[in-house]
Image: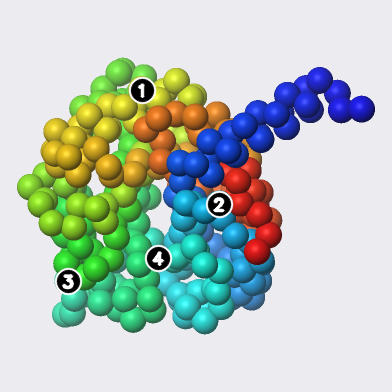
Amino acid sequence: MLNQSVFQTELKKSVLSKVCAHRGFIIAANWKMNLSEREAADYFTQLNKLKAAEKDRVILFVPSPFLYLARGLLTAGGVAYGVQNLFFENAGAFTGEISPAMAKVYGCGYAIVGHSERRNLFGETDEMISKKVRACLANGISPMLCIGENAEERKENRYRERLGRQLEKALGGLSDGLDKITVAYEPVWAIGTGMNATAAQAAETHAFIREKLTALLGEAGAKVPILYGGSVKDSNILDFVPLRDVSGFLIGGYSLKAENMAKIIRLLGGGPV
Ligand code: PGA
């Protein structure tokens, strides 16, 4: 016999997976600078055995040297891939950079833009991020714009100003390709720390982001998917699923194992091919 708490968890999962299957979520993995060539190939092969729920979309943000593997090995419908960063020019003397056109060569449909690690460790400014968003759109790549406040800004209740400013600088004045934009809200204090935002914090912050997007982009802003990221895993993802303005997830550490991604895909209503 199932004990009461297992039964409750199973019930919650089954109800929520119906909600998910109905709404459609973006399930994005950010591998960062991880995995070997062999591990990447195995990962793609394992994901090919799974099918996300009808309206869900899986996006793998892999290290650029593995894009050729993604192109060659990913056969699962509904699994897309992209780069974790790119530059805003298409050619020139920019040592070490990858252009949107080069990302396209490998079939990338997506690019993460403005991840907090790029902002904080590599000095990316709001101005550069704005240029990158525009370069993506000009080259037919869907930008996933990351925004997020740090611990101090959260503690001192200044996070709305920070998020509002990041959105304005990156997206203000855009009028074309708005349906290609995705925003990922990733509180910096929750990235890689095991400390996720609470459902209440996410609900309130995503609603604020939605309001801001609508103010900036009009009707199109009401449709921009807003993902939550920051220590997402199987044990907390279902807390965010019912929230109206959460349209999916950007998952770092937990996504490094294909079996974990498989768990997430199944929790959100997908299953074997
Ligand atoms: P995390 O990373 O899931 O390991 O917190 C998320 C991200 O940085 O995109």
Mark 3 highlights which residue?
A: 89
Helix, strand or loop at mark 2: loop
Q: Residues within 10 Å of mark 4 (few under 14, many from 20)?
A: many
Q: Residues within 10 Å of mark 2 (few under 14, many from 20)?
A: many
Q: Residues within 10 Å of mark 1 (few under 14, many from 20)?
A: some
Mark 2 highlights which residue?
A: 53
Residue type at the position of mark 4: Gly
Quarter of the view holding residue 100: bottom left
Mark 4 highlights which residue?
A: 82
Q: Residue at x 52, y 53 (%)?
A: 54
Q: In front of the other: label 2 or label 1?
A: 2
Asked if residue 229 shows in the view, the reply is: no
Q: Earlier in the sequence, mark 1 or mark 4?
A: 4
Q: Residue at x 86, y 23 (%)?
A: 3
Towards the viewer: 180 or 102: 180
Measured in 3D between alpha carbons, the distance from the residue under mark 4 to the one under mark 3, in whole angstroms, is 17 Å
Residue type at the position of mark 2: Ala
Mark 1 highlights which residue?
A: 204
- For the C terminus, which image quadrant? bottom right
